[in-house]
């Protein structure tokens, strides 16, 4: 049969086959580009302040204001199938040791993120950057818990699978710290939430009873 | 009957024998059945009621635009690395990670929403609480949730995490749902083509 309908159908069929094949090859080709991104973070200032979620709310809860330095090089994540890279900085803290009444033992919240559309924007160097999001805890209080910072990214392709990666406190540094060698590096990834308003509860001097 | 078919320009139908018509109808049913089986098969493999979704809003632009097709995965079983960033060493609760893109359905609202997880809170006896935000939105999704709901429940409301992406292919379904009459027309044309085709 050589009617125009049949021809149209064949052309369309061929077009879809070819485009799916090309899309498949493109998606697979990403495997040829191994990436090695790097990042270093240093938290410079943390403040915890009481506030309300919005003007009409009467609920008081704590908000953390974090300032940080970030150096990152994500340029190796870019290849011909990279549409954009989404990068973020998150704060991770547990339930705290010896803290009673804390129900949530695993917490993580993004404090800063960015859409990096091209390789030109993929080298980050931020100094004293204020967190984009002033986070609050689900239970309303940070309770001077210890926290670590994680740097993560998500590569979003033109077609194919999404990929993720994370950089955490360098393991080698953590080991050295355990061995007793005090080293500056790696400390910037860890911090402790200060008490509200920065005031330290002064322990009552010995001998006095209230 | 014959006159009617002639009038409709379908005189070709008259020449088909009943056996031929039956086999064509069977053919049509087979195509529909195959499509349905593939969909349900994917659904079982991904453990998600809807393993493929079409992006309906621009809240994740420029990464996801209206009409793009997303493949979801809703199983953890050690395959979480394909659906989100690696799990922290200290983590006791594998599953959805911060930075992952989830699709959720709020109870009582029927529109699936594709947004990124920006906060995670989990304890031994608490639900897996998530907070989401669209990359292109200024504020997080608290406004989109039900009244007085501040966090999502991972088990109840999330139907999967995005693992794969094909641009634009799903735009047909947006057209179909925005112009319902197109559905009838498409089904009619497809049915006629299958029945009229003689091989």
Image: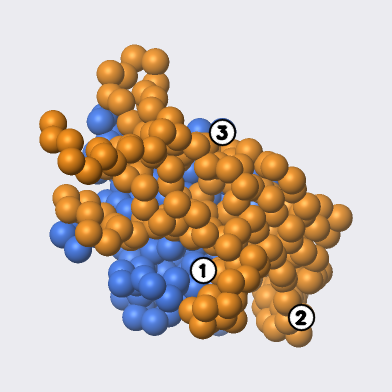
Chain colours: A orange, B blue
Which labelled disc corresponds to residue B138? 3
Image position of A14 with respect to A62: above or below: below
Residue drawn at x 74%, y 48% is A126
Instruction: Name the residue tied to disc 2.
Output: A33
Whether residue B68 sits left or right of residue A49 in the image: it is: right
C-alpha span from label 2 to label 1: 19 Å
Which-is-in-front pick, marks 2 and 1?
1
Within-10-Å neighbours for mark 3: few <14, some 14–19, many 20+: few
Q: Position of residue B185 (x, y in %)?
A: 49, 47
Residue drawn at x 17%, y 36% is A208
Residue drawn at x 13%, y 31% is A210
Residue drawn at x 58%, y 77% is A181
Chain containing the residue with disc 2? A
Whether residue B83 sits left or right of residue B94 in the image: it is: right
| Whether labels 2 and 1 share one chain | no
Instruction: Name the residue tied to disc 1.
Output: B85
Front in this rendered view, residue B138 or A144: A144
Q: Quadrant of residue A32?
A: bottom right
Q: Looking at the image, is mark 3 or mark 1 earlier in the sequence? A: 1
Q: Position of residue B41 (x, y in %)?
A: 35, 77
């Amino acid at each position: 049969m050589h009617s125009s309908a049949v021809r149209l159908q064949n052309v369309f069929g061929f077009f879809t086959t070819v485009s799916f094949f090309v899309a498949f090859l493109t998606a697979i080709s990403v495997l040829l580009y191994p990436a090695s991104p790097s990042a270093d973070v240093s938290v410079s200032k943390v403040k915890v302040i009481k506030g309300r979620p919005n003007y009409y709310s009467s609920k008081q809860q704590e908000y953390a204001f974090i300032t940080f330095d970030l150096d990152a090089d994500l340029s190796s994540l870019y290849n011909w199938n990279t549409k954009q890279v989404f990068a973020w900085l998150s704060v991770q803290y547990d339930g705290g040791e010896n803290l009673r009444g804390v129900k949530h033992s695993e917490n993580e919240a993004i404090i800063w993120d960015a859409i990096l559309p091209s390789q030109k924007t993929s080298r980050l160097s931020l100094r004293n950057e204020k967190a984009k999001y002033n986070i609050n805890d689900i239970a309303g209080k940070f309770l001077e818990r210890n926290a670590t910072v994680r740097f993560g990214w998500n590569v979003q392709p033109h077609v194919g699978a999404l990929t993720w990666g994370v950089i955490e406190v360098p393991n080698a540094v953590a080991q050295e710290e355990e061995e007793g060698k005090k080293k500056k590096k790696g400390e910037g990834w860890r911090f402790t939430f200060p008490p509200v308003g920065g005031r330290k509860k002064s322990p009552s001097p010995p001998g006095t009873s209230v | 009957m014959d006159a009617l078919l002639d009038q409709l320009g379908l005189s070709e139908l008259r020449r088909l024998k009943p056996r031929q018509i039956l086999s064509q109808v069977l053919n049509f049913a087979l195509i529909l059945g195959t499509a349905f089986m593939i969909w349900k098969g994917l659904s079982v493999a991904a453990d998600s009621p809807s393993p493929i979704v079409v992006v309906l809003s621009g809240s994740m632009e420029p990464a996801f635009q209206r009409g793009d097709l997303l493949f979801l995965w809703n199983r953890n079983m050690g395959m979480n690395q394909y659906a989100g960033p690696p799990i922290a060493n200290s983590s006791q609760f594998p599953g959805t990670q911060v930075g992952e893109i989830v699709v959720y359905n709020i109870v009582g609202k029927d529109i699936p929403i594709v947004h990124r997880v920006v906060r995670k809170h989990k304890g031994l006896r608490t639900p897996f609480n998530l907070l989401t935000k669209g990359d292109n939105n200024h504020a997080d999704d608290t406004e989109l949730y039900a009244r007085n709901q501040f966090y999502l429940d991972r088990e109840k409301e999330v139907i999967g995490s995005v693992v794969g992406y094909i641009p634009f292919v799903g735009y047909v379904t947006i057209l179909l749902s925005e112009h319902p009459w197109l559905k009838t027309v498409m089904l009619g044309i497809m049915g006629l083509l299958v029945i009229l085709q003689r091989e």
